[in-house]
Amino acid sequence: MKKPIIFALDDDEQVLRAVTRDLKSEYRKTYRVMSTVSANDALEALIDLKKKNEVIALFLVDQRMPEMLGVQFLAEAKKYFPDAKKVLLTAYSDTDAAIRAINDVQLDYYLTKPWNPPEEKLYPTLNDLLDVWQLNFQPEFEGIKVIGYQFSPKSHDIKDFLSGNLFPFQWMDFETSDKAKEIAELHDLQPSDMPVVSLQDGKCFKNPDIIELAMALGLNAHPKDNLYDVVIIGAGPSGLAAAVYGGSEGLKTLLIEKHAPGGQAGTSSRIENYLGFPKGLSGQELTHRAITQAKRFGIEFLSPQEVTSIAEKDGYKSLTLGNGECIRTKSVVITTGVNYRKLEAEGIDSYTGAGVYYGSSMTEAQACSNKEVYIVGGGNSAGQSAVYLSKFAKNVYIVVRKKDLSSSMSSYLIDQIDAIDNITLLGHTNVTKAIGENKRLTALELTCNDPDKVREVPADALFIFIGARPYTDWIELGIIKNERGFIETGRDLTRYENFRTIWKKDREPFLLETCSPGIFASGDVRAGAMNRVASAVGEGAMAIKFVHEYLSEM
């Protein structure tokens, strides 16, 4: 936490040096001491300090100054730091003005010059005032602040990006938060500027795009080199494991992620069946550990950045990024995972990001406090989100087409859900329509398997966890996929009639190798994958073994 500030102001440089010396001598371990001879400069400094989220504990100000009287300065300073203690330094002739200031600016004390010795005439008074200030002081959140409208899709995207990339932030609804209005007034922000991201140094970004925000936060969106041993596309559990093993085994490794590390697993509130963690761990915790481990082995991490195409020439692969840059690599591991399938129901697209969310339950959990929340989906991700959201929401309803969850969800999660009073399972039910007002979701139309049973229910949020659609549309190069878009690898490729026209190596493809030599697929994006975190991690590690074997052929 930043040290609070003691701010001294006196137009007499000799007096200011003396008081600054005495203040630092006594308080430098607990407070920062700032001082200036100009009242106008001091007011400018206060605005800058306020923008940077600094805190002033005490003002020690001379009364007679040419630019303005000390009482006038304290009246202005109170607008920015109303809780700071206020002390006037006066000559004997100014004591009447100081006494009047007690009522005018809620002056806490006045001291007459000279104050020697400070041990008797300065420190006891200031100590008492600072003790009282500390008792009432509530430190503000010092990190990133996001100000916007709760049901704005752009606000949701920014919150989701920050959360996924493990940046702590404080959300402020511009319509309801007094603090948000204070920041907006300080920075002269208009409603059209929302959402706004305020950084710790006080800099504000108005309606930023994700790349702009990422660069400001120190993320790397541009590759440092032109040629790598292996490029891993996608930073889910499989990609992170591949990065750890690639880096630890001496390969020049680049990991590229278009949104946030962790993939779908990274958004999980609790993973309880991962080996070695008997009490479970969150997806964010697992992601943080893996990213830290991979970087320790020297891998380069590019995020947020998207690969839009792969080409091949003379055995080298060329990757084109979303910003037009090109990267050359000897091998590629595709670990782009899957996206949640869109819910085909009337009105869903109209309220996506404004009450309707795909995944993202952790991002919007606080906004669901004492609300009616619906979840569509019967897999583990849906179950974990239901358990997590039940801590905030008034009621959570799980909507599934089947009778119950037994065929799609782990039994430990079903047991947890059964034990939570405010979670209700709605079996044999579909969401057929999303209804809203003022550009936000307010209700859902639910249809039972019997078409005659249709009802409308109030709903504040809908979280969708249905199906698995592989993120492979961008992949060309003749790479063989199955009818659902998952990438075929290894021996399974031989089932396809066009395989031999594409594959020109004397050997058979390695277990995780695609029909293009040196391009591998692992994790949920691969046809036949087990869709478990542990198996994805195992495949990521295995992919690097085959990368080594492929590189030995070059």
Image: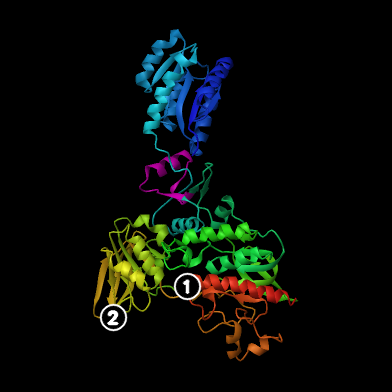
Q: Which of these two is toward me, 468 or 158? A: 468
Specify few, some or many for label 1: CA neighbours under 10 Å numbering under 14, 14-19, or 20 or more. some
Amino acid type, residue under disc 1 in the picture: Arg
Relative to 254, is 334 above or below?
below
Q: Which of these two is toward me, 253 or 51? A: 253
Query: Is residue 280 located in the magenta-colored stretch of the structure?
Result: no
Give the x, y percent position of residue 377: 37, 72
Query: Is residue 194 located in the magenta-colored stretch of the structure?
Result: yes
Q: Is residue 19 visible?
A: yes
Relative to 111, is 415 above or below?
below
Relative to 38, is 374 above or below?
below
Residue beneath disc 1: 532
- Which residue is painted at 49% across and 12% down in the image? 117
- Secondary structure type for disc 1: loop
- C-alpha gap between disc 1 and disc 2: 30 Å
- Secondary structure type for disc 2: loop
Give the x, y percent position of residue 505: 71, 85
Mark number displayed over residue 230: none
Amino acid type, residue under disc 2 in the picture: Asn
In this rendering, would 496 be left or right of 316? left
The reply to whether dot 1 and dot 2 touch (C-beta < 8 Å) is no
Q: Quadrant of residue 397?
A: bottom left
Residue beneath disc 2: 449
Q: Quadrant of the C terminus?
A: bottom right
Q: Which of these two is toward me, 44 or 541? A: 541
In this rendering, would 499 be left or right of 68? right
Q: Which residues are magenta?
A: 169-196
